[in-house]
Amino acid sequence: MESTRHTCLKLELPPGDGPIFVKGTWFDSHFDLSITDGLHSWTCHATEAEVRLRAEQWDQPVSEYLALVERYLGFQQPGSCYAFEDAGNSARRLSWTFEKQGTKLEWRWKCQPSSNDKQTTAGILDFLLDANIRLSDEVVRNSQAFEKLKSEAERCLSLTEKYNKEKAEYETAVYGKFVAVLNSKKAKLRELRDKISKMEAVAKAPVHEDESTDKTESFDEESSDDQMKVEPIEAPSDDLHATSNKKNVRKRKTRN
C-alpha cells in the first residue's frame, strides 16, 4: 500500500506578497499541493509521469526528488528564496532555490486556480485545526511525561545524595577501623622486632661469657698450681718449727 504523508507550511514571501499556506500530500511517486492566501486558492497535482520526467531532468531517482521537494515545501528552509509569481490566466508559479555542489538551482511548479476557493481554504484550515489539536494533545502528554520524569529525576537525585552521604560515612568508619587495625599491627610488629633484637643479643652474649669464664678458670688453675707449689715449701718449715718446739720442751723436761 502506498504511504501518505501530510504537511502544512506557512510560507513567508518577500515583502508585498504576504504569507501563503501550502498544504502538501505526499505519496511514493507523486504529490498534491493546495495553496491559499486566505482569499484565493490554487492547486497543483504533480502526476507520476511529471515527477519522473523532472527527476530524470535533474538526474535523480524519483524518491530522492520527492524527498527534496517535501523538504523545501514541508518546512521553510533558511537561505532559500521562495516566490509565488503570476503565471497568467490566474495561475501562479511556486518556486524555491537551493544549492547543489556550489551551484544555486531553482525548482518551479505551476499551480492552477482552485475550482472551489472556499472548499480548498476550508480543507487547509481543517487540517491546521486537526493538527493543532493533535499538537496540543501531544504537548499535554509531553508536559505530563516531563513532569513525571522531573519528579523521578528529583527522587533519583535525592536518593543519590543519600547514598553518597551514607557511602562517605561508611568509608570514614571503615578507614577509621582500618587505621586502628593498622596501628595495632604496627605496634605488634615493633614489639616482635624488639623481642627478636633482645633474643639476638642474648644469643650472642653467652659466647663472650664462656671465653671470660675459660680465662678465669685458667687463671684460677694457674693460681692453684702456684699454691700447690708453695705449700710443699711452707709445710716443712711448719713441721720443723713444730719439731724444734717439741725438742725444746723435751730438753726443758730433762733439765728439770
Image (tube, helix red, strand yellow):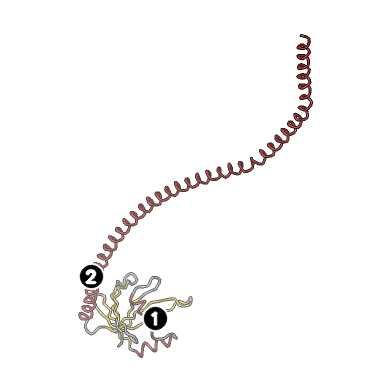
Q: Is residue 243 left or right of residue 65?
A: right
Which mark, by number, is residue 107?
1
Three-letter residue code for mark 2: Asp
Q: Which of the 4 quarters of the picture holds residue 42?
A: bottom left
Q: Residues within 10 Å of mark 2 (few under 14, many from 20)?
A: few
SS at mark 1?
strand
Q: Which of the 4 quarters of the picture holds residue 68?
A: bottom left
Q: Earlier in the sequence, mark 2 or mark 1?
A: 1
User: Does 193 appear above or below 138?
Assistant: above
SS at mark 2?
helix
Expressed as whole percent of the image width and height from the top left, the position of residue 148 reads 26, 63
Three-letter residue code for mark 1: Trp
User: Does 19 appear above or below 55?
Assistant: above
Q: Residues within 10 Å of mark 1 (few under 14, many from 20)?
A: few
| Residue at the spot of label 2 | 137
Q: Is residue 178 left or right of residue 243?
A: left
Expressed as whole percent of the image width and height from the top left, the position of residue 142 reads 27, 67
Expressed as whole percent of the image width and height from the top left, the position of residue 233 reads 79, 26
Measured in 3D between alpha carbons, the distance from the residue under mark 2 to the one under mark 1, in whole angstroms, is: 36 Å
Q: Nearer the viewer, residue 241 or 207?
A: 241
Q: Nearer the viewer, residue 147 or 130?
A: 147
> Which residue does the image show at 73% across and 33% down from the upper left?
219
> Which residue does the image show at 39% across and 86% down from the upper left?
62
Q: Residue pushed farthest top?
A: 256
Of the 4 image quadrants, the one containing the N terminus is bottom left
User: Does 98 appear above or below 187?
Assistant: below
> Which residue does the image show at 35% across and 83% down from the upper left?
109
Q: Which of the 4 quarters of the picture holds residue 147?
A: bottom left
User: Which numbered disc, 2 or 1, marks the residue closer to the eye?
Assistant: 2
Q: Nearer the viewer, residue 228 or 63?
A: 228
Q: Is residue 80 left or right of residue 20?
A: right
